[in-house]
Image: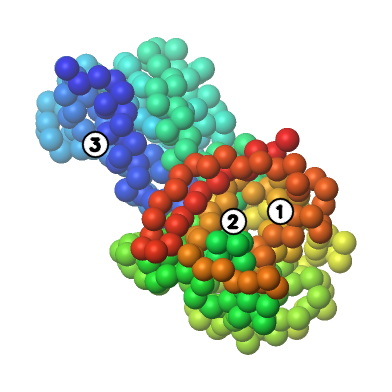
Amino acid sequence: MTSPKEHMFEALSLAKKGLLTTRPNPMVGCVITLDNKIIGRGWHKKSGEGHAEVNAIQDVFDNFGSNAPSALERSEMYVTLEPCSTTGKTPPCSEAIKKNKIKKVYIASGDSSQNGFTENEKDIEIIEGLLEEEARELNRGFFSRIEKNRPFITAKMATGLDGGIALASGESKWITSSISREDVHKLRATNEAILTGTGTILKDDPSLTSRDSGYDNDEIKQPLIVVIDRSNKLTGNEKIFTQGSKTLTFTSEDSFISSSRNELCVMKKEDLSNLNKMMQYLANEKSINTLLVESGSNIFDSLLAEELIDELILYQAPKLLGKDRHTFSKFNQTSQKLSTIDFKISSISNLGEDRKVTLIPNYK
């Protein structure tokens, strides 16, 4: 007999289909069962379109026709996120559930941005918390935005075995293999914004777009490129401003940037060092759930010192960059606090000759 967990795993699998298309909404999947057999499936496909629960109910109607109302009254629903109870671009899913008289709903994770479906619907048997950890991991960016008031922040670095990111001369291109670079393009495609600084832009002039990710190009939405330009060094002629991606630059009122695709967020000089304030702006004003950091050591160390980095991904090539190499962090030179940060290894995988290590900071 299929267990409730297996049905919820199916709902989670459906939710993942919206990986590139639901932003800024969370990914949500839903299955409806009758006599322990799935009779309807649905997932949230795109922001502004039908939610998972409504799509699953419609699937039951498509499958059962005129017998759908009777089947739904006897059915059970499995949904990965608490059904919405407020009207946004679409009507609340709670109303669709009540209208179709579904009496039992399994929910993987609650949603504090809603009006309390679990507490308010007294006529529906609700079981919450089934595969909650998996559901929260799937939408870790969404939960970070609504609970921490900032995006989920992943820092990415390409290094040699000795932690070097560039030779003494500053040369840094292609430390890692083409396979690792393809994986970085996947990272870019699955993050809603990329944060960098003027040092990286002036040295490498990167485009920071997702190109060879392997995902369907029709589904990829290029990430917003976020730049911190404290000293007004950028002009608007750099690649990030000319290659089609939208950009947001945190800068002062003296900025020289002129680009139709760039938005300036003018801040006081002292606020341009306030990373917490910038992250809150991205969450509240831009609805950014996930942020990928591709920068040098200054921004990386500052984020780490403020305990803002949630995940660190190291692409490590089997190379030594030498004695006077540039390193991805200057822990001992920046803050005593940094030396107290431990990391938990989340995963290690091989990418050709390179190694990909995913680490979770343990802030003490």
Q: Is residue 362 above or below residue 188?
A: above
Q: What element carries label 1?
A: helix
The quadrant of the image that shows the N terminus is top left
Query: 46 or 61: nearer the eye?
Result: 46
Q: Is mark 3 on a helix, strand or loop?
A: strand
Amino acid under disc 2: Ala
From where the camera sits, is residue 223 visible? no
Amino acid under disc 1: Leu
Q: How crowded is mark 3: few (under 14 residues within 10 Å), some or many (20 or more)?
A: many
The answer to which image quadrant residue 102 occupies is: top left
Of the residues tagged 3 and 1, which is closer to the observer? 1
Q: Residue at x 70, y 85 (%)?
A: 235
- Report if the CB atoms under discs 3 and 1 are less than 8 Å apart: no
Q: How crowded is mark 1: few (under 14 residues within 10 Å), some or many (20 or more)?
A: some
Per the rendering, the mark at residue 303 is: 1
Per the rendering, the mark at residue 41 is: 3
Q: Which residue is drawn at 17% across and 29% down?
A: 39
Q: Where residue 63 appears, x then y in whole percent?
A: 13, 35
Q: Residues within 10 Å of mark 2 (few under 14, many from 20)?
A: many
Q: Where residue 296 appears, x then y in whole percent?
A: 67, 67
The answer to which image quadrant residue 38 occupies is: top left
Residue holding disc 2: 155
- Report if the CB atoms under discs 1 and 2 are less than 8 Å apart: yes
